[in-house]
Amino acid sequence: MIHLPAPLSINRYWTIQRGTGGIGPSAEGRKWKEQAKVLASRQAPPGAPFVGAVMVEIVLHPPVRKDGLASSVRVDLDNAAKCTLDALEGVAYANDRQIEVLTIRLGEARPGGGMTIGVAPI
């Protein structure tokens, strides 16, 4: 299992690129992706990066509030996918096109929030 900090919202991850007008990762997005890639490489499953078809499960953990309950402030599940899957390229699999099964769900609250990712060959 790979444990990472909470992903950025897709609105913070992507931005319009100066000069070209195209869309690409923001400075904050590039920084998150680099940090996530380093953390993931330390926790990659044996045999990774996989070269064939893979299945990925992402469990998003909302942060715990001061009263001990799960915070309602969190990234939408669908927004958690893209930056997470991009960060795992070259670490858990060679290319995210290898993903044939993708599951994303909400998990239990944890201090500071974050996510747990499982990657396995099919």
Image (tube, rainbow, N blue to C red):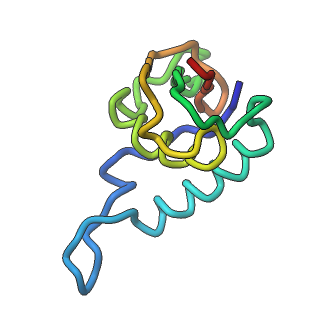
Instruction: Count every numbered label the image shows and give the total.
Output: 0
Q: Position of residue 111 (x, y in %)?
A: 67, 27
Quadrant where the image shows the N terminus: top right
- Above/below status of 33 relative to 43: below
Quadrant where the image shows the C terminus: top right
- Above/below status of 62 relative to 37: above
Residue at the image position 50 percent from the left and 45 percent from the top = 95
Relative side of 121 to 77, left or right: right
Q: Position of residue 81 (x, y in %)?
A: 41, 35
The image quarter containing residue 33 is bottom right
Relative side of 114 to 28, left or right: right
Give 53 or 26, whichever is nearer the viewer.
Answer: 53
- Above/below status of 10 relative to 79: below
- Above/below status of 35 relative to 69: below
The image quarter containing residue 88 is top right
Residue at the image position 56 percent from the left and 62 percent from the top = 31
Residue at the image position 29 percent from the left and 75 percent from the top = 17
The residue most toward the bottom is 19
Give 88 or 39, whichever is nearer the viewer.
Answer: 88
Q: Position of residue 84 (x, y in %)?
A: 50, 41
Q: Position of residue 51 (x, y in %)?
A: 60, 37
Residue at the image position 68 percent from the left and 32 percent from the top = 3
The residue most toward the left is 21
Give 105 or 63, whichever is nearer the viewer.
Answer: 105
The residue most toward the front is 52
